[in-house]
Image (cartoon, grey):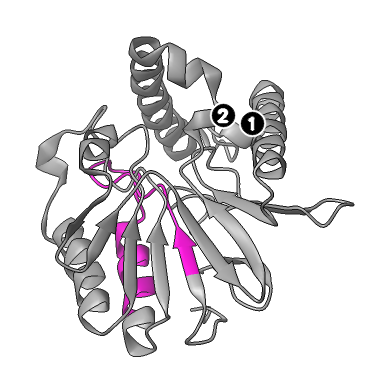
Amino acid sequence: MSIPQYHKNDTIVISDFHLGTKNAKVEKLSRFLTVLLENPPHRVIVAGDAFEFWSTNYKNIGRQEHQIVTKLSALSELGTKLVYIPGNHDRAFRAFSKFAFGKIKICSEYIIRSDHKKYLVLHGDEFDSFTRNHVVISILLDQLYILLVKVSVFARRFFGKKKSLSSKKHSSKYGEIVEKIRALALAYARSRKFNGIIMGHTHWPELVRNPDDLIYANCGDWIDNCSFVVVGEDVTLQYFK
């Protein structure tokens, strides 16, 4: 098991658990949160799509999923500031933005101030014009994606195929979409005079340092990558294995 590298004064940004889907790496996420409980960071930001409301079979929500919520709550009880930014798959929680449930703050965006710098954190679907403007079609495509995952598992099991049929990373078209989202996010951060922008949504973990020192960080997901971003004296992208 890899050990997350962070200091107690750092902020950890994670997103896109999609709890309620069979593809969610719930057990690994639970182990990751156990590590954080042993050495609580200053702040944890869940940057959206923690829950899957588009396509969830609620029979898939069981004890392990409940443990994730319990461990996040336990972190807040230990003094970690817990911030929840709803995404497009759990957009129902956006109605509660600017509210606090106990020690958990819900908001549409959050600003991290660290080492005399400011970083904007949000989910990221704000820069995805297709998802924002075609919600119903996006939900249908999400159902298709789940079907492709099942077909991929069947193919690998019975035909020995190693390449995932559903992998977004194998799609050059999706890579183009990610580039457009990244460009819009950077332009937005630059217009608001931030030193960087941190988001999820794309399931494409990356850390980009631009020539003007503006940082774009995507914390990835807990479906394929089990990745997260740490903000302290610097910004780092890490993977939990």
- Residue 74 place in picture, x, y as percent: 20, 77
**Residue 158 in the image: above or below residue 35:** above
Identified at 51% across, 69% down, the residue is: 240
> Tag 1's secondary structure?
helix
Q: Are dots 1 and 2 in contact, CB under 8 Å?
A: yes
How many neighbours does mark 2 have within 10 angstroms: few (below 14), some (14-19), or many (20 or more)?
A: some
Per the image, the residue denoted by label 1 is 181
> Which label's residue is closer to the chain start, 1 or 2?
2
Identified at 51% across, 38% down, the residue is: 124
Q: Is residue 85 left or right of residue 230?
A: left
Residue 17 included in the magenta stretch of the image: yes
- Residue 63 place in picture, x, y as percent: 11, 60
**Residue 237 in the image: above or below residue 190:** below
Identified at 64% across, 44% down, the residue is: 192
Q: Amino acid at mark 2?
A: Phe
Q: CA distance from mark 1 to mark 2?
A: 5 Å
- Residue 195 place in picture, x, y as percent: 70, 57
How many neighbours does mark 1 have within 10 angstroms: few (below 14), some (14-19), or many (20 or more)?
A: many
Q: Amino acid at mark 1?
A: Ile
Count of picture labels: 2
Label disc, if present, on residue 127 of the rendered structure: 2
Per the rendered image, the range of residues in magenta is: 12-34
Q: Is residue 29 among the parts visible in the rendering?
A: yes
